Amino acid sequence: MDAQLLTTVRAGDTESLDRLLRTASADALAGDKGSALLRAAAFAGNADVVASLLDAGVDPARPWDDGVDPVSWAADFGAYEVLWELVHNVPYWRKQVPQHLKRGALDIGRLWLSLDPEVELRRRLGAHPDEPAAVERVRILTREQEPEHATRIRLTLADGRQAETQLDHRAIVTYLEHQFDIPVTPDELLARALFHADPQSCDWVQAEVGMAYHLTAEDQFRWAADLVAHPSVDTRRFATQLLHSLSCQEQPLKAQALEVLRPRLRAEDDPIALENVIGAFAEYTDRGDLTDILHQAGHPDPDIRGCVAAMLGNAIGEHPRLGPHANLPPHPFDTPPGVVATLIRLAADHDGGVRAGALLSLSESGLDTPAVRDLLTAHLTDDHLRARLHAAVGLALREDPHGLDALHEIGAEFSPMDGLRWKVHGVEKVLEYRAATDG
């Protein structure tokens, strides 16, 4: 095996790997060499590297030297993101996984649902239940640009022998059940999400996705609406997150949704569920009256204050000269009372993330008053990078030379692939378009 390829796979460097794969032999990648690279990527838990190898022609169903195929291994290990890449049939040129391997993976995943991971790891090591062992739980990111994470358990005996597994078996079962059109109740999906009760885990996220597999948007809404005041905080988190997701997509039963969400704006005491409620309420109003969320601008949790700042952007609308219609005249938009004053107050928050959210809403709005310009100018020296960036963007869009200079200076701080650099680039393109059409 090419040592450089293997080193790159283990390092998780997808950019360098893609470059090396372009010159690798297709026959070699489809055979033992590619299979060994796939094994290394799977064991490292890097789904992006697995994807690059599959796109290059590596066979996802080819057994490894020990006779285990990658799909069965991923199901047993609980590596959801790796398994998803192995069985997902996009892009079309990837080699396909036979149905019997998918069915076998589903059976393996289901078996794990009835097991205690630590007990099972002891069994596999041949250890007595009372034998001393060190147990380590570690959160890992399996993709470079995704917030979802997995948890790995590693059990180490006194003699140094180890066994480990990843805790995404419920996500695997949910996904594969959909592949075979196997019905699942929403209560079962909720139970899978709440087993580890981690909103950023693959189990939780896939359970929410599973709702869309099995229920219409209206039925999802009715099911979640019945649970928004549930005594279990984790249940409320899941139900309100589902409502938030629906508000960003189909927006079923809008009038009923506002009736369900409005009282929760004051009654919900959990910050995570409350953030979901605020987000869903703001989306369902369609840039309507958001005065119901203004009182949460003083919430002790900065995530809530930041959420309010971001959502109030819906109430004041986007800058009328952004995007492909940047040459159109301003469109009148009535801003509800108190919204601008609240944003200005949040722009002075002691938390930098909250300031950044408020400045983002103001900078990309159609508001152009001396007070707004003075505020943006004052934050060109903010010690929080995103706050400083949004202040510069707001002034640049208003064709203030100080904002343009600051935007170029801030843009130079980012690497070409940084998301904030793309933000700067986007504003620069808008200004170029505006100059060309105005000229």
Image (cartoon, grey):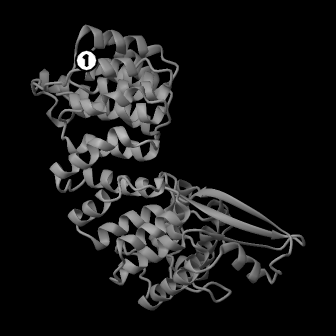
Between 154 and 6, which is closer to the camera in this rendering?
Answer: 154
The amino acid type, in three-letter code, at marker 1 is Arg
Other-residue count near label 1 (Cα within 10 Å), few / some / many at <14 / 14–19 / ≥20: many
Q: Is residue 406 above or below residue 248?
A: above
Left or right side of 222 for 307: right
Q: Which residue lies most toward the right here?
A: 159
Helix, strand or loop under label 1: loop
- Of all residues shown, which one is farthest toward the front? 231
Percent of width and height locating residue 283: 25, 43
| Residue 415: image location, x then y, percent | 50, 36
Q: Is residue 249 above or below residue 296?
A: below
Determine the image quadrant of residue 367: top left
Q: In which quadrant will I find the C terminus?
A: top left
Whether residue 232 can be seen here: yes
Q: Residue at x 46, y 85 (%)?
A: 102
Residue 22 shows in this picture: no
Quadrant showing the N terminus: bottom right
Q: Is residue 318 above or below residue 343?
A: below
Tell how many labels.
Answer: 1
Q: Residue furthest bottom?
A: 100
Q: How far across and down, in percent of the image, does residue 297 sit? A: 38, 27
Q: Nearer the viewer, residue 37 or 217?
A: 217
Residue 98 location, quadrant = bottom left
Q: In percent of the image, x 65 and y 75: which residue is there?
A: 116
Residue 394 shown left or right of residue 57 in the figure: left
Q: Residue 148 at what x, y percent from top left?
A: 50, 56
What residue would you read off at disc 1?
398
Measuring 48% from the left and 83% from the top, which residue is drawn there? 106
Q: Is residue 15 above or below residue 425?
A: below
